[in-house]
Image (tube, helix red, strand yellow):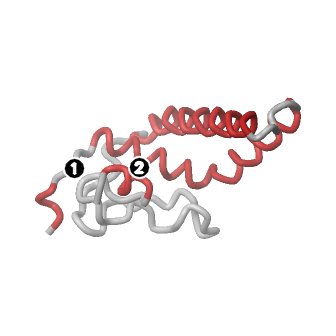
Amino acid sequence: MSYINSLLQLRCPKCRRGKMFSHKPYSFKGISSLNKSCPHCETLFQLEPWFFYGAMYVSYALGVAVAVAVYVLLVLFGFGKSVLTSFLIITGIIILISPYVYQLSKAIWASFFILYDPKKLG
């Protein structure tokens, strides 16, 4: 599995097979259901206390990127003329994708520190 696919599917950064979260982003059972370790290779995800604080910066960057992309699309399709309309559409989309971005930002942050090991595929 490629790096991008493993991130988008919220997989373990070490083996790219095990799931990082026990529940899907839009599940009502728990958005922050991070597994303590990978079910496949048993890599610990929480490297130290408060490890995922840095994921806030990743989440912010993803939110800004989505807002800019949506605004560019609105302008290209002719809906970007009204500031209020643009604001409401961008806000609505960011609210809709925020559970997924929350988990994705943790997966991206963990992948900066937990490096891929092809030997863990077995």
Residue 83 is situated, as x and y percent measured from the top left of the image, at 85, 30
Q: Secondary structure at mark 1?
A: loop
Q: State the residue position of label 1.
A: 116
Residue 76 is situated, as x and y percent measured from the top left of the image, at 72, 36
Position of residue 66 in the picture relative to residue 81 (left or right):
left
Residue pictured at 28% horizontal, 60% vertical: 1
Residue in the foreground of this view, choosing between 79 and 52? 79
Position of residue 23 in the picture relative to residue 79 (left or right):
left
Residue in the foreground of this view, choosing between 15 and 21? 15
Position of residue 11 in the picture relative to residue 41 (left or right):
right
- Give the answer, above or below, for where 82 lies relative to 34: above
- Give the answer, above or below, for where 72 lies relative to 6: above
Residue 56 is situated, as x and y percent measured from the top left of the image, at 52, 36
Farthest left residue in view: 119
- Specify few, some or many for label 2: CA neighbours under 10 Å numbering under 14, 14-19, or 20 or more: many
- Displayed quadrant of residue 16: bottom left
Q: State the residue position of label 2.
A: 107
Residue 66 is situated, as x and y percent measured from the top left of the image, at 61, 39
Label 2 sits on what residue type?
Ala
Tell me the number on the disc at residue 67: none
Q: Which part of the image, by quadrant, shows the C terminus?
A: bottom left
- Specify few, some or many for label 1: CA neighbours under 10 Å numbering under 14, 14-19, or 20 or more: some
Residue pictured at 30% horizontal, 68% vertical: 39
- Displayed quadrant of residue 2: bottom left
Q: CA distance from mark 2 to mark 1?
A: 13 Å
Label 1 sits on what residue type?
Tyr
Q: Secondary structure at mark 2?
A: helix
Residue pictured at 45% horizontal, 47% vertical: 106
